Amino acid sequence: MAPLLTVENLRIELTTRDGVAPVIDDLSLNLNAGETLSFVGESGCGKSMTALALMGLLPEKVGRVAAGKIIFDGEDLTQASPQRLREIRGNDISMIFQEPMTSLNPVFSVGEQIAEAIRAHQNLSRKAAWDKAVELLDAVRIPNPKGRAVDYPFQMSGGQRQRAMIAMALACEPKLLIADEPTTALDVTVQAQIFDLLTDLQKQSGAAIILITHDMGAVAEMARDVIVMYAGRKAEYGPVDAIIEHPRHPYTQGLISCVPHIVSDMSEERPDLVEVPGIVPSLKDFGRDECLFASRCAHRTEQCLAERPPEKPFAGGQLADCWHAEEL
Amino acid sequence: MQFLLTTSKRVFYAIVLLVAVLVLNFSLMHLAPGDVADTISQSMGGADQELLDQIRADYGLDQPFIVQLGRYIGGVLTLDLGFSFFYNMPVTELILQRLPATLLLVLSAQLLALIVGVLLGVMSARKPNGITSHFVTFLALFGYSAPVFWTGILLLIGFSLKFQIFPVAGMQDVTIEGGFWVHAKDIFMHLMLPMTTLASIFLALYSRLSRATMMEVLGSDYVRTAKAKGLTQRQVVYKHALKNALSPVITLAGLQFSAVISGAVLVETVFSWPGLGTLAFQSIIARDTPTILGILFFSALVVIVGNLLTDMALRLVDPRLRGR
């Protein structure tokens, strides 16, 4: 069976004041129906840009797909007309955004906003769409959905708003759901609830999920595969278990060691939290023919600064873009 | 229920404000040197002290200030604004005769400025570097900096004299005969130029403001959400974005309401529009104090009602304001 989504050698360029920068550089991936793929990496690594490219919502006149293909359900989205992309958005592919506080329109009731998403793609009466919106609010476990549907976003808590966003994204039973840091703005306890909800809904609907996050814990729990992104390039790609077990890229190692562990015995000495030193390079350096992580890497050699590292395959389908992947 | 409660609260405040305006107007007029008796005697070619005293007694001007004020307010409460010696009729009647013309001019100009201004603002916000955007910037600069009487005269020369499309002055052609629609069309033709003149200043303001707020709103997260839902461009811009961008424009329109009315005084004078503005102008020249006071009172009333309507419109547009 062909995968639901195949991305081949995708390159996305942003026009900035300093010239054209490749925010996504040579990205390839496969995602099957019903599976979850996770994108991890620091802010500014191009995770959200990938999501926007899949939705056909790259910033107008600034961002463009420069090369590569996005094949969704047999159709190359990079060649699709704006009209066709509009039909797909919210219907076959939908998205949950990072900021539930600002992502809902403050002047329309939550029910209206969900019903609108339904009516954009299905020929339903106002009444029928409203009833379906109430059902969806119930499905995302908002208590008293009938009463809450008439509420405006400002009358809801952050967690409830994110649930409403999820209800909206699921309104047309999409084949692919992109969740762009869905829990970053929420309390830790609410985060777990949202992840549980997403997992349950995925089981019911069979949708594939792309989960963008920098929470390695969430990745381990939710996803089958993970792509570690760094400065617009893939650092490592493969099954979550294999990568957490044995990360081959120094950046992945750094990210994993950043996750704090709770010590079971309080008398036990806590290990110090490790950080990845330095910051992501600025956009204008993204296109360079070298390992972009080199400046922050403890394993750096001459070769890393001279040439971009190739993709190296390992057992279990794990891929790592590092000159020293074998040694790590 | 909540809506009724807040509205009635606003109405109560509005009445308090109106009384305050009344007291202030009356006091200011009282402070100015000279009174009705002087003016009347002047128009009679002079009078002796005895006659002056007689006039003052007739008009109640010999009473202490506080009594006069009390009488005036009492009168206003029963809609009696005094008697205009210049027009020789009750002020209330005089004003009610002129009020519809002014309301027609002010409301139509305000509406025209709002609708066209917002549309131009939205169009230019969608393409900030397009031709429309530059046109709006130019129009705003022109409309805002050109004095309203000059714009009026220019339009008169252009569209009434050179191209004789619209009538030169007044509000109705008395020689015209026909049914309701014939008269309505006649008034509309008379209205076009003064309305456009008065709207020009405010159109500039509204288009600039809606352009700015619209640009901000178009970059917001919820507009991205609306796009992600697969809505059409039109739905995204004119439903999701515009409803959010409207609040500041409505607020400004409410604040500008008094400016529109004072602008109407000039426009009415230029176009001999038979409204309160012309009346105000004439009664100031004639020092017809009761009429001036009456007009001030009605202007305040119109502004306050305008603000109440603004408040309600804002509540309609933005649900976040409804609880307050």
Image (cartoon, coloured by chain):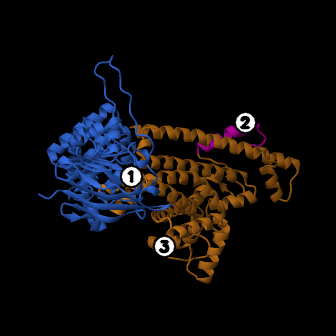
Give amino acid for label 3: Lys
Provide the letter of the chain coloured orange. Answer: B
Q: Position of residue A262 (x, y in %)?
A: 31, 26
Give amino acid for label 2: Ile
Tag of residue B185: 3
Depth check, front residue: B200 or B133 = B133
Q: Position of residue A316 (x, y in %)?
A: 17, 47
Q: How many other residues sit within 10 Å of disc 3, few (<14), some (14-19) or many (≥20)?
A: few
Which residue is depicted at the point 51% across and 73% down? B186
Subunit that carries the residue with mark 1: A
Depth check, front residue: B120 or B216 = B216
**Distance from Cα at disc 1 to Cα at disc 3:** 81 Å
Q: Position of residue A76 (x, y in %)?
A: 24, 65
Marks 3 and 2 in Cβ contact (< 8 Å): no
**Chain A drawing hue:** blue
**In front of the other: label 1 or label 3?**
1
User: How many numbered marks have been drawn onto this rendered protein structure?
Assistant: 3
Q: Earlier in the sequence, mark 3 or mark 2?
A: 2
Q: Secondary structure at mark 2?
A: helix
Marks 1 and 3 in Cβ contact (< 8 Å): no
Task: Specify start and end residues of the magenta stretch as a single range.
Answer: B59-78
Q: Secondary structure at mark 1?
A: helix
Subunit that carries the residue with mark 3: B
Q: Which residue is mark 1?
A: A304
Q: Is residue B239 above or below residue A204?
A: below
Relative side of B10 to A99, left or right: right
Give yes or no for residue B62 being in the magenta stretch: yes
Give residue A232's quadrant in the image: bottom left
Is the same chain shared between marks 3 and 2?
yes
Give residue A102's quadrant in the image: top left
Tag of residue B66: 2
Mark yes or no: residue B273 visible: no
